[in-house]
Amino acid sequence: MSLNSKGIPAPDAGGKTGKFRYVILTVLSIGVAINYIDRAAMSVAIPFMGKDLHFSPTDSGLLLSAFFWSYVLFQLPGGWLVDRLGPRITFALSSLGWGLATAACGLASSVGALVGFRFVLGAVEAPTYPASSSTVTRWFPRQERSFAAATFNNGSKIGGTLAIPLISFLIALVGWRMTFVISGVVAVGWALLWYFWYRDPRQHPSASAAEIALIEENQDAETGAPMSVRQLLSQRAVQAMMVGFFCVNFVSYFFFTWFPTYMVETFHLSLMQFGVLGMLPGIAAIIGGWCGGLLSDGLVRRGYSLSVARKVPLAAGMIASATIGLAAFAPNVGLALTALCIANFGATFAAAPLWALPSDVAPNRANVATIGGIQNMAANMAGIISPILIGVLMQYTHSFAVPLEIAGVVGILGALVYAFWLPRVQRMSLPQSQSDTSHVRSGV
């Protein structure tokens, strides 16, 4: 293999640029989908589990929220670990852990035990998105990165959508306990596949010289040494990413937590009716993610700045997500689903460039996963607040109207954050007085 003047492998004469990075992306997205099937299994199963274990609505909200306690706490350590060990080892260990924790839920005999297993599940799932962002940064040139990020993020929507019919079918077939065991075993199998198969571009035997050249010639230049977590948190861009992503997740996590209960209890759907109709917002979300990613990358290719390419789908998507509030006034299931489909489309349309932003703004590749962990930590505070808030409001108002209206307001707030608080999208740098010593403070 010959090298060019930059030490990058030169393409073979007459050879075509390979597309193996899309194979990597496909396997990565499958892993994220499995992650979300395991994560969403509880929300689908909880109406049936409650009959066996006698849950109150507040107990259900506590159980749904427990996952996010540890998921938030371990985002920073998870992102830091990805930056140190790389996505291969970290993602494999994470998937192995969440598979075992999911299977353990099938053994629980009380709400307390389930809360404990969900807490473990959140901790071991924490590196998933930072590892995915790091993988995309390593394998994709900048002009393809938003679509790639949207695709692995769509793995969550695919997993959440498939979870509804798959988990419903399994519960009907083998009961909720064995359903958790089967879901966990699938995750363990994926962990083994990822560990033994994944490598970075230069180390992977299936990556061609032309593809490696394309990837490495279109990586963004690093502006300096890695920043510490404290230095990153002082950056306006990181602060806006944290608050904006919180707003995105406040809308999105309704669909992964209370959506099944909302549909079944509000419109008195049977299990099979919900299994079909409940997929529609998820399908809308999948389409929205790819549309947002294609738009963002298309703007980059047309010469628009990264700020325009990222902010347009972010702000427009969040405005669309606010239609979740209209579902509160829907007189029938058709209108409610229409509002919810538009909202879920908008949330993932906005989410498309979210996981490209860490590689856009990181001063050094060693900060990409850490920044991803920081924004995901803030985003998943919504996972702690939203399920408990909805559960409490449900218990006292016996209606989903107020929670849906609150989610709509949060969607508008997210649009304002991305439009006006998020600064110009570019690599962050420290003042000279700080950057001179940043190398001694670059740890967590």
Image: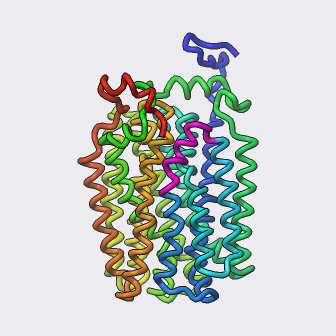
**Residue 170 seen by the camera:** no
Residue in the foreground of this view, choosing between 109 and 173: 109
Using the image, determine if residue 142 lies above or below residue 55.
above
Q: Position of residue 227 (x, y in %)?
A: 42, 33
Identified at 43% across, 79% down, the residue is 391
Q: Position of residue 7 (x, y in %)?
A: 59, 15
The answer to whether residue 401 is magenta is no
Using the image, determine if residue 86 lies above or below residue 382.
above
**Residue 350 seen by the camera:** yes
Q: Position of residue 211 (x, y in %)?
A: 61, 28
Quadrant of the image for the N terminus?
top right
Image quarter of residue 46: bottom right
Image position of 40 (left or right of 76): right
Identified at 48% across, 77% down, the residue is 61
Q: Position of residue 373 (x, y in %)?
A: 48, 47
Image quarter of residue 306: top left
Identified at 29% across, 55% down, the residue is 415
Q: How did the renderer colour the structure?
A: rainbow
Task: Read off the magenta span.
Answer: 73-87
Identified at 67% across, 42% down, the residue is 89
